[in-house]
Amino acid sequence: MNNELVEFLEQLRHRYPAETEFHQAVTEVAKSVWPFIEKNPQYRKAKILERATEPERTIMFRVTWLNRHGEVQINRGYRVQMNSAIGPYKGGLRFHPSVTLGTLKFLAFEQVFKNALTTLPMGGGKGGSDFDPKGKTDEEVMAFCQAFMNELYRHIGPNTDVPAGDIGVGGREIGYLFGQYKKIRNEFTGVLTGKRLNWSGSRIREEATGYGLIYFTEEMLHTRNLSLTDKTVVISGSGNVAQFAAEKAFLRGAKVVTMSDSDGAIYDPAGFNGEKLAYIKELKNVRRGRIKEYAQQHRCQYLEKQHPWGIKCDVALPCATQNEISEQDAKTLVQNGCICVAEGANMPSTPEAVEVFLGRKILYGPGKAANAGGVSVSGLEMSQNSLRLQWTTEEVDKRLAEIMKAIHNQCVRFGEADGFTNYVNGANVAGFRKVAEAMLDQGVV
Ligand code: NDP
Ligand code: 2IT
């Protein structure tokens, strides 16, 4: 690595020693864009990378609420407003006990470049809380969401910052958050995305991340004259992204054989069909049960406390969480014949795993490109809210497919060298370039 780059990364580590995931995300982007910055001294002079790694604003607040026993509960809420060079801050909220400022800074940083790739005018942000929705009643989740919004409302708005869902935040939570925002502000606006369809949500938003992931995967496969038909696919996670990735892969003729949650993975060698996927949706979204129940009900293998990466496959779609594919997992996948890894989750592959994929020259689509379909349809939801219109399913799905294609084209344009597309470099350089140009235009702010 170049000395100046090493020094930049060391300084950042020194400034924020505890934020390991943030450093992991910055290191990857900085390595990709460094040669580009060296060729364009105006970016150096304007300290674009230094500015892009310091959030424009970070909000941290106490959230107090009463549980079902009337006991006082205390959580911490966050919103990291990372970069607004190309539009209002935009990005999800994560409710999970593991949430720290470092996690949200990594997610907000990734979001900036992801949103730039979507072709839509959105800046980057991320927020959330260490609140754990698991095991809570609907009333408790509502009490928490209302208390969270009692502080967050002053920092967001349809032209300022537009949050959405992420891990632990789906349609239910967005509803409670929206209701409280509307009550406090006395305004019905597009301040959140992922809203339900009957009160100004967008069609296909729920499906968008998973569907977009499959559209992107198909684009990658097409570059090698391959398709998803008859491919064996392994998926991790069983939440929003995993469910709709599995659904679209199945509709495209692939055989999806695994899903997982934080307790373990199910392996159904026959593959999921419409009926089995409906069971998983009901289990996870309505009953909020554990994926183990699928194995008991459908008499298939349950891999307790395991990831699905040991199962032989052609395509792997990590759709659970960060750093869920280790170097060894990556080696196992490649040894078993996996030709394509596309990330539904944000940063699911460790840097060592990424090295394995790139070294073996398989198709590897990093999250900021491959999972950008979710935020893209969020952008389309914002457009529809401004127009006070709701587009048809066909219209939104068509736009989503076009956006995923455009993202793929950008990755190829900026990532191709010697006949191999390095999608990591392509996504980072294309996203960075757009944000950097806007920052230069807008002066030192
Ligand atoms: P959900 O909450 O709907 O589902 C998350 C899934 O991942 C669950 O199966 C969950 O299992 C599992 N999981 C979560 N944390 C862990 C962990 N620490 N270890 C093992 N398994 C875990 O979230 P989403 O599907 O929305 O998000 C999944 C990933 O996709 C995240 O990385 C998110 O940032 C990313 N993403 C989401 C988008 C969206 O639109 N929702 C858009 C782009 C990316 P369990 O139930 O046991 O916790
Ligand atoms: O990581 C992500 O892109 C999301 N969680 C979706 C963000 C959004 O604003 O829809």
Image: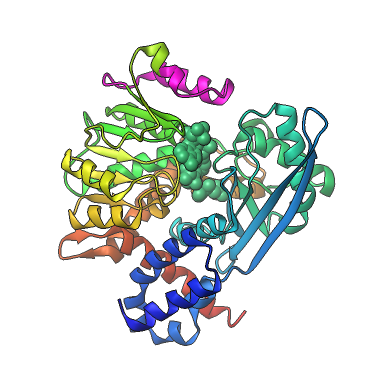
**The C terminus lies in quadrant:** bottom right
Task: Please say whether residue 207 is visible from this viewpoint.
Answer: no
Question: In the image, residue 162 lies at what x, y percent?
Answer: 64, 52
Q: Is residue 75 above or below residue 438?
A: above
x then y, percent, for residue 141? 70, 34
Q: How is the image coloured?
A: rainbow
Q: Is residue 296 above or below residue 197?
A: above
Q: Residue at x 44, y 66 (%)?
A: 26
> Position of 441 compared to 69: left or right?
left
Q: Residue 102: image x %, image y %?
A: 55, 59
The mark tally for this picture is: 0
Where, by quadrant of the figure, is residue 84 drawn? bottom right
Q: Where is 340 relative to 350, above or below?
A: above
Residue 395 in picture, x, y percent from top left: 48, 39
**Going by the image, does 171 lie left or right of 66?**
left
Q: Is residue 339 magenta?
A: no
Which residue shows up at 77% across the image and 32% down it?
Answer: 67
Q: Is residue 293 magenta?
A: yes
Q: Is residue 174 left or right of residue 48?
A: right
> Residue at horizontal 69%, vertical 34%?
199
Q: Nearer the viewer, residue 118 or 99?
A: 99
* In the displayed structure image, the side of residue 146 where residue 110 appears, left or right: left
Which residue occupies 34% across, 28% down? 258
Residue 309 vertical placement versus 148 (above, below):
above
Screen quadrant of the N terminus = bottom left
Specify start and end residues of the magenta stretch as a single range. Answer: 268-294
